[in-house]
Image (cartoon, rainbow, N blue to C red):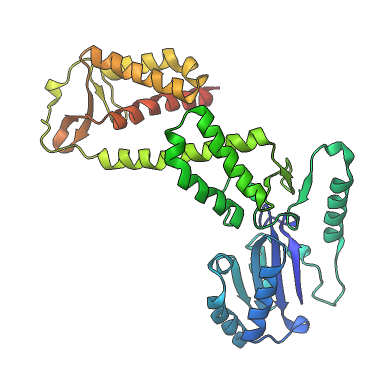
Amino acid sequence: ARFYMLANLCAHSKRGAVWISYAVDQYRDKMNGKGFVEMTSLALVMPMHWAALHLCTDDPSEAIICKAAMALMPAEMKAKTRVHYGSHTECQYRLTTFGIPHVALPFTTMNNDPILEDHLAWYKKCLTKCQDPAAGKSSINNHFGSNQHDVLFAGRTYSRNGNEELRSMAMRHVQKYNGGNPKQRRAIVDSMVENIKSKGGRFLKLDADGSSWVEVSMPEVRQKIAQMFRNFRRPRASQQQKTSLPIPNHLPLLDETDIAPNDVLFGRKVCHDGNLRLKHMVESMAAEYDASTRGRKKQLVDSLIEDIKSSNGRFLRPVEGGKWQEVLDDAVVFSKVSSHFRNNRRSNKEKQ
């Protein structure tokens, strides 16, 4: 018995289809390694997004052959494939551990009667969506409607041609984009959009209930591509902070008696006049900070740091032996001070 079920009918996955090969007891269908490869090849060519592939069998030799044949599978499909060996009870129990209840299987263990209620309910739901004129937007079925050149926006990275092409173009243009003015950046984004569309690709996102893909408007497409360019800058800044965390050995070590009142001490649960002053400054600027854009937030943090330094304050971090060292890296200081604004916002939410 081989069948597939849509994953939104069970708790296995939020999107995609689940392929299940069930060769147990009366549903046994002898399958050698060649048959396994053929079945997997069929699953790969079907126009569906596969969330998982489950192979259930009560034949130990067949289970070994299936696991060995997994070596021939593409890496992406191999990570989604599981082999379950045992009786009806054992195989169905293992399926439940992946969020697939036995009531979701389209058969009964007593006879060969198919159970198609869930599948027909899903099919009717799709027909209703496609025929609803009040939707006001084109709806593409979640599993069958997208092609290889479509770009999918769904809050996670997709390994498909359209998404890979878009990321590749963005990486080629990132330096030109970062150094350009708004008009030049707009031209770069539009050229990337036209490149995808010239191949028949579309820009899609999931609808509110996550069951279908809908086309994204051009303003939103431009916004998402611009966000992609901004994301390229973040890893480098993060790496710069990580590499700059160690303090050079030539900096002097400070005792507690060397700490000035306006110094800010990095560390947990530090009670010092400079830290209390920083806390009050953050609280006084928190409302404006939370309502500001990213550029304005940077200005606020920079002004706060400059205010502390202008009052002869330093930013110190603890080292071994109860000593302190001054942090001279501006990126590290900026990151630490920015975290005070985030912590303040979090504490306010907890109080509410």
**x and y percent of residue 64 in the render?**
57, 83
What residue appears at the point 57 percent right and 73 percent down from the top-left corner?
A: 73
Q: Quadrant of the N terminus?
A: bottom right
Instruction: Determine whether, in the image, residue 331 is placed left or right of residue 120.
Output: left
Quarter of the image with the C terminus is: top right
- Position in image of residue 259 (x %, y %): 16, 21
Number of marks present in the image shown:
0
- Quarter of image, res 72: bottom right
Determine the residue positioned at 15% across, 24% down: 256
Q: Nearer the viewer, residue 162 or 348?
A: 162
Looking at the picture, tell me which residue is in the foreground, 179 or 116.
179
Compared with residue 240, is residue 346 higher up or lower down, i.e. above or below?
Answer: above
Q: Quadrant of residue 220?
A: top right
- Residue 258 at what x, y percent from top left? 12, 21
Q: Residue at x 87, y 36 (%)?
A: 134
The quadrant where residue 260 appears: top left
Q: Name the residue: 57% across, 48% down.
A: 156
Residue 345 appears in view: yes
